[in-house]
Image: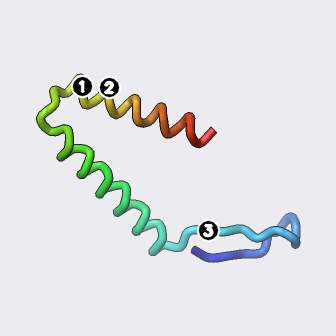
Amino acid sequence: MVREASEVDARRVAVKLTGAGRELLNASHRWQQERFDSLVAHWDLADRKRFADYLRRLADEVVE
């Protein structure tokens, strides 16, 4: 991550991911997907999709 002064408001600081930070985030997402897939591999496709949809819904509601 890098910190940069805001171009709009000198009191604010913008925080942005570096290239390495983006790679780490992407690797984390891949790892999470792999773990999820291995945990529910024995479920049928419809159940895996339904469960994934519920997890996304929960995550969206927590963020709001």
In the image, is 59 to the left or to the right of 10? left
Residue to which mark 1 is pinned = 47
Q: Quadrant where the N terminus lies?
A: bottom right
Residue 16 image-quadrant placement: bottom right
Residue 26 image-quadrant placement: bottom left
In the orientation shown, which residue stands out farthest toward the top? 46
Q: Amino acid at mark 2?
A: Arg
Label 3 element class = strand
Q: Nearer the viewer, mark 1 or mark 3?
A: 1
The correct choice, above or below, for 14 with respect to 48 in the image is: below
**Image coordinates for residue 12, horizontal then vertical, percent:** 82, 68
Q: Which mark is residue 50?
A: 2
For marks 1 and 3, give the CA distance: 37 Å
User: In this orientation, which residue lies closer to the viewer: 7 or 24?
Assistant: 24
Residue at horizontal 56%, vertical 68%? 17
In the orientation shown, which residue stands out farthest toward the left? 42
In the image, is 20 to the left or to the right of 64? left
Q: Which mark is residue 58?
A: none
Label 2 element class = helix
Q: Amino acid at mark 3?
A: Lys
Residue at horizontal 66%, vertical 68%? 15
Residue at horizontal 24%, vertical 51%? 34
Q: Are marks 2 and 3 in contact (CB under 8 Å)?
A: no
- Disc 3: CA contacts within 10 A as few (<14), some (14-19) or many (>=20): few
**Image coordinates for residue 47, horizontal then vertical, percent:** 24, 25
The correct choice, above or below, for 48 with respect to 21 in the image is: above
For marks 2 and 3, give the CA distance: 34 Å
Q: Are marks 1 and 2 in contact (CB under 8 Å)?
A: yes
Residue to which mark 3 is pinned = 16
Q: Which label's residue is closer to the chain start, 2 or 3?
A: 3
